[in-house]
Image (cartoon, rainbow, N blue to C red):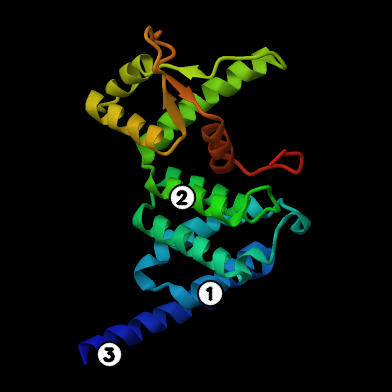
Amino acid sequence: MKKKKSLERSLDSLAKLFSSPIMSILAQIHPLSAGIVTFLTQYYSQEQYNSIQDFLHIIHERVRVIESRFIDEKFIETKEGKRILGKVFKSIVRDNREEKLSAMANLTVNIHFKTVLSFDEKELYVDILDQLNSLQLSILQKWALQIKKRKAKAKDKSHSRGVGWESLKDRYESKGFSSALITQSIRVLVSNGLVNENDATIVDKDNTHFLTGFGEMFYDFISDILDEESHY
């Protein structure tokens, strides 16, 4: 009897959520929003509402300036698309910190674009982002921005992709993170192919690691919405 009442309450809450004005608006604003709302009505329950609503608000902020012609509206209708989107929502329910929601929202919108990425690549991006915590995302961001700044200065000339962890270590230790945790976080980035270790015999402190081309591309997909001139 208790289980039945609990189920009834969940169903009632579910109905109220998806009949609410905000959800109705989100479903009508953009094809991507509509597809996501439709997906949610079929698969998710009450205890996940807060994370999902926060995520949808971020999605809305991203898609309202995007022209529909750039969106692959058939993506969500495919078996692969449904599986990938399912992974997205499982991830944000497990880790709903602001930086993770923002990164996953950017990635979710970007994988709906008509990009060069295959289904397998899109799924891999979601799987990798799912594994990364806030500290690992922060380290990746600092290194990626460092390389982008260096690349902008070099213009068409070659530039180093080397990054160092010692100055990074000092910065994060001052914020209360242990050296062991920082080292472990970098290992996670390495294991996912985002960063490589410098295996040279003599290693400069500013070149202990290298941001890979894959790592730079991955960061582009999670850090912002791709524009129409993007080569992706």
Rounded to the nearest angstrom, the CA distance separating label 3 from label 1 is 24 Å
Q: Nearer the viewer, residue 183 or 118?
A: 118
Q: Position of residue 84 (x, y in %)?
A: 51, 61
Residue on which disc 2 sits: 101
Q: Is residue 179 left or right of residue 86?
A: left
Q: Tell me if residue 224 comes above or below residue 30 in the rendering.
A: above
Q: Earlier in the sequence, mark 3 or mark 1?
A: 3
Which residue lies at the image location 42% right of the left edge and 36% below the top edge? 137
Q: Nearer the viewer, residue 124 or 169?
A: 124
- Residue type of the residue flagged with mark 2: Leu
Q: Residues within 10 Å of mark 3 (few under 14, many from 20)?
A: few
Which residue lies at the image location 72% right of the left edge and 38% below the top edge? 231
> Which quadrant of the rendered structure holds the C terminus?
top right
Which residue lies at the image location 54% right of the left edge and 35% below the top edge? 214
- Callout 1 secondary element: loop
Question: Pointer 3 and pointer 1: residues touching (CB < 8 Å)?
Answer: no
Q: Which mark is residue 20?
A: 1
Residue on which disc 3 sits: 4
> Which quadrant of the rendered structure holds the N terminus?
bottom left
